[in-house]
Image: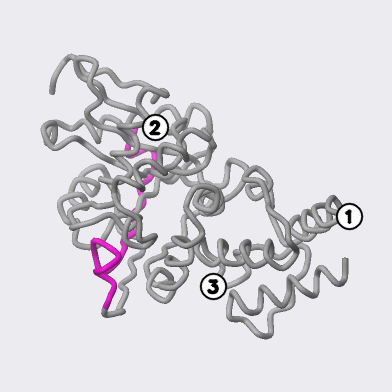
Amino acid sequence: MEEIKSKVQTIFQKVFEAPALEIHEALTAKDVEKWDSITHLAMIAKVEETFGIRFKLKELIKMNNVGDLLTMVKLKTEEQK
Amino acid sequence: MSENVLIRQAEKKDFYFLADCILSADQSNGAHSSYTQIFDVSKEAFHAILLQMLDEELEGTELSPVHFLIAEINNIPVAAVSSWVEGAYDAPSWMIRSGLFREYIPQKNIDAASSIKVITDEMVLQRTEGTLQIEAVYTHPDYRGKGYASMLIYDQAKRKIAEFPELKIVELMLYLGNDAAARAYEKLGFVEKQSKICNHPDVLKYYPSLGMRLMQCDIQKLLI
């Protein structure tokens, strides 16, 4: 999970133009200035590309925070093994 | 006002009309809809995309048919308004909207939207959680001036407060420069709470206006 978190943090820092951003499980869009509908799409696309996964629509909608995102990434990467 | 007006919930047969409403409401009194310009998609293509999004029947955004009320005259839909309580469903409306965009808009077109983020960032106003959102307000041009939109907004407020008794505030957004709409909303009791102007020189290539205005109203004023 730490490796997943580290990679996701790098993605967040780049997409949201926040080099000092440190992600944590409770982090939501309200906490990050440039996290809106367009940057959210860019972030999701980058996460999918990085981990070689694809989220379903219903999975995307149920992600309430970064913790949910990390859990889903872990689940999907494990499904592929 | 015609006595033959029927206010009803939108149904699957209305999806084509709802897609018209969403696009036309967004176009406002401008030359084009921001959806088509931001995503670099033709109006016809985006209309088809909207039909697919509506077919998901998700709750929580204006892209959700379940939130639309329609005014119908002699079996013809003539006006529509969407309304939902922000944050009352699976996710904030913008996240549900994003998910639908991701699902149905080709990646190259999403990339086109990302490339003008510096403009879209300046046009975003945040919706207030727990407020009743009014969106996609549209009346066919042949039926304007008869109060159908106001009638629909009233009906939306009445239905939603029955479902969410704690509701206090109604909120809507409109483009700056849409003064006729702003005056109509002021008559209903809406006041401006926030506005935003985009100073980017290319803003009018993508949006019908230079900025956005957020208006709010006490729900009890609408229900008088």
x and y percentages locating residue B126 in the rendered image: 46, 60
Disc 1: host chain: A
Badge 2 marks a residue whose secondary structure is: strand
x and y percentages locating residue B77 in the rendered image: 25, 25
Q: Would residue B178 be found to the left or right of residue A30 on screen?
A: left
Q: Quadrant of residue B223?
A: top left
Residue at mark 2 to residue at mark 1: CA–CA distance: 44 Å
How would you rate the neighbour count of disc 1 (Cα within 10 Å): few for under 14, some for 14-19, many for 20 or more? few
Whether labels 3 and 2 share one chain = no
First-in-chain label (1 vs 3): 3
Is B59 located above or below residue B208 in the figure? above
**Disc 1 residue type?**
Lys
Badge 3 vs badge 2, beta-carbon distance below 8 Å: no
Q: Which residue is mark 2?
A: B68
Q: Which residue is mark 1?
A: A81
Name the residue nearer the viewer: B53 or B5.
B53
Name the residue nearer the viewer: B94 or B188.
B94
Disc 3: host chain: A
Q: Is residue A42 rendered magenta in the image?
A: no
Q: Which residue is mark 3?
A: A34
Q: Is residue B216 rendered magenta in the image?
A: yes
Q: Which residues are magenta?
A: B202-224
**Disc 2 residue type?**
Phe
Q: Quadrant of residue B4?
A: top left
x 31%, y 21%: residue: B7
Is A58 located above or below residue B121 in the figure? above
